[in-house]
Image (cartoon, coloured by chain):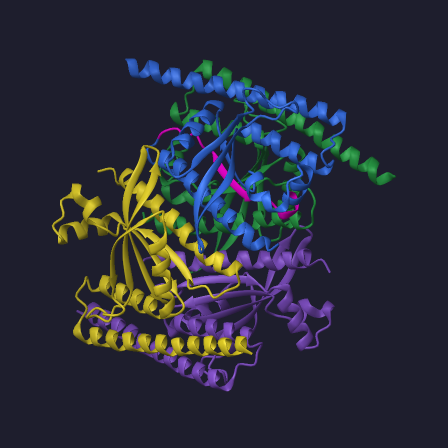
Chain colours: A green, B purple, C blue, D yellow
Amino acid sequence: MNWGVILAPYKQVVEELKVKLKGMRIQYEYECSHSPIEFITGRVKPVQSILEKAEKKKIPLNNIEEEIQDIAGLRVVCPFVDDIYMVVDMIRERKDLTVIEEKDYIEKNKESGYRSYHMIIEYPVETIHGMKHVLAEIQIRTLAMNFWATNEHSLNYKYKGKIPEKIKARLKLAAEAAFMLDEEMSKIRDEVQEAQRIFHKK
Amino acid sequence: MNWGVILAPYKQVVEELKVKLKGMRIQYEYECSHSPIEFITGRVKPVQSILEKAEKKKIPLNNIEEEIQDIAGLRVVCPFVDDIYMVVDMIRERKDLTVIEEKDYIEKNKESGYRSYHMIIEYPVETIHGMKHVLAEIQIRTLAMNFWATNEHSLNYKYKGKIPEKIKARLKLAAEAAFMLDEEMSKIRDEVQEAQRIFHKK
Amino acid sequence: MNWGVILAPYKQVVEELKVKLKGMRIQYEYECSHSPIEFITGRVKPVQSILEKAEKKKIPLNNIEEEIQDIAGLRVVCPFVDDIYMVVDMIRERKDLTVIEEKDYIEKNKESGYRSYHMIIEYPVETIHGMKHVLAEIQIRTLAMNFWATNEHSLNYKYKGKIPEKIKARLKLAAEAAFMLDEEMSKIRDEVQEAQRIFHKK
Amino acid sequence: MNWGVILAPYKQVVEELKVKLKGMRIQYEYECSHSPIEFITGRVKPVQSILEKAEKKKIPLNNIEEEIQDIAGLRVVCPFVDDIYMVVDMIRERKDLTVIEEKDYIEKNKESGYRSYHMIIEYPVETIHGMKHVLAEIQIRTLAMNFWATNEHSLNYKYKGKIPEKIKARLKLAAEAAFMLDEEMSKIRDEVQEAQRIFHKK
């Protein structure tokens, strides 16, 4: 398999979506209002990880493009929890992509402590051989959720998916601390908005 | 007028088209074939130049978005003259934009010596207030044409559009030298392709 | 005052230090070891903020370059608290800059809850008029400290330095949550390193 | 050999020199004067090319860093021929690098038609293991020279260094056309500068 050629449209999708999502943040800044987006990152899944996922989930190699939904992956990091749902709404309303599936791991977080909002979308991309519809996953989370998830990911990698119980317990405590940080920050956001409402009433 | 807010969608269009056109070049490289694109640049017209153009062409300020077609501007620079027409074809076939108008200043170059292919396109861009259709100009030219045009542009700017006759004559000689360079390079391209054809026949 | 010309060397210093500090992160990744750097940002202080600081601290305009030490500002964000001191050591040992002053607001955090490590450095930069020594401030902090500080900065800006007591109290609670997150994460880092030590002893 | 680790300092040098040379262009723009630099590119020589050069020149693998001088390569592209010598002077005067060797292939161009100014420099770079002195090559040329050289490079690659005589002859004609374009453009530069001198005398 020529992975360079197979993954080229996915690279293109990641680049286009990065520019499109960053555009939302920049437009908020122009209008001098609070931006619900702190930063955006994107990546194409490494070939090694695609092969491992295909083997684990028993996906034949020629079904990869339909059945592995996160070959193209975007991450939107937000300052506050409420901003996440604002970003989700904006993505739902775009005409240049179609939302296929949504999973809310914030309302109902994973056993491990993982919290994030996931959207699977379908995106039409122009290639030198014509138009192609490609799947991509967008993960939306706060800074605290992202910090926790980054560390869990490294540990999972180091322990090949089998994190020792003692460290798992520690990770849960850290997830609670991250959750508390988000909670405290949300209260500040509310205070500020309330202060603004009082101010504008006068 | 809040120019930051007015120009924000144009900035977004320039960023998106830059990524999309660069994508074509990268895909050619993955497939190891000759890329018809050397590099791509883009810019939003400075406010000062928009105002000057509006005044000169007597365009009322609230018609600017419909009547000034190059607020968003992209430039595609190609190695060879034939590559220009290949890029034009690829742009015509894209489903994510609509070609409104084309001007071929290569077949029939301007009095000044200027040569380039111009396309006016309409591009749908998602903003934080919903979708918007925006005009953009794509200029397609060779390296030699680009070099000449860059220098002419500086001189025009310096002399406020009234380049002295003596320098105008010099510019025409330079335009001829640029044209000759493109001609010589085209012959090399033909030689190479012929050599390849002979090779593949064996 | 031509601020464009005055600030040009500072812009250059920010760009050079960004590339140099990013280089440290990339080199760690090549050698496949834990990088103490998560990301780096940089900025030149906006003219408005320079003028406000000069007025507040009664600095005459022609002493600005000697007395305002953070016209060029860099920020290094680290995953763990211990990483901060590792970065501080690496900066101290560089031959291409001189450390002038250090302030540890982590050991002894500010009244507000602010935590970060600050270094003032002197950096020789080549300009088109010859070499020039420029001051710059490097702030080094964890992701949690950075998240808190970003929010405090916005609130300070909104309330023009006079955050209401009620919100100040909330900010302190958030600072404690950020501190706890760092503590929990540090324990995970220790666990992992201990696990590795046990592993290597066998 | 772990090429990732060996080449990491060269990548760093290319990044630092790119930012430093770009800085010169930006500073000229701030001061609103003609910039002698059009654009800058940089690359680390691919491993394959390093190995081929080592074999061809019979350089043992552990002497590579001393004997192959263009592992780190920078290219400065100038609008006019005179700008090249201005850039050369500025590089000679920098205190953050040492010029080791210079070759003027403009005064005395290569048999093939190749024209460019080459400088070999030594640059001290900080790595995570301390300071290291690294060699780099800076090529300085006009847009026309660059265009010609890019095409010659592709042909050399295609024909593995043995370009057929017929195409070689064509390339020489193209080199002459590029030379003429530079000549014509130089005359315009002189005209403009003379016009400015007359203007300022008044």
- Residue nearest the observer in this picture, A199 or D40: D40
The residue at the point 66 percent across, 28 percent down is A185
Q: Position of residue D75 (x, y in %)?
A: 34, 58
Residue B171 falls inside the magenta stretch: no
Q: Is residue B122 above or below residue D56?
A: below
Q: Position of residue B140 (x, y in %)?
A: 47, 70
Horizontal arrangement in the rendering, residue D117 relative to residue A23 (left or right) = left
Horizontal arrangement in the rendering, residue C123 relative to residue B157 (left or right) = left
Q: Position of residue B176 (x, y in %)?
A: 39, 82
The residue at the point 68 percent across, 26 percent down is C171
Q: Is residue C178 visible?
A: yes
Q: Is residue C35 visible?
A: no
Q: Quadrant of residue C35?
A: top left
Q: Position of residue C101 (x, y in %)?
A: 50, 30
Q: Which residues are magenta?
A: C33-49
The residue at the point 65 percent across, 41 percent down is C54
- Residue nearest the observer in this picture, D194 or C176: D194
Residue C48 falls inside the magenta stretch: yes
Quarter of the C terminus of chain A within the rendering? top right
Horizontal arrangement in the rendering, residue A36 relative to residue A72 (left or right) = right
Residue lying at the far right of the rendered structure = A202
- Residue nearest the observer in this picture, C11 or C121: C121
Q: Is residue A174 above or below residue D83?
A: above
Residue lying at the far left of the rendered structure = D58
Tally of marks: 0
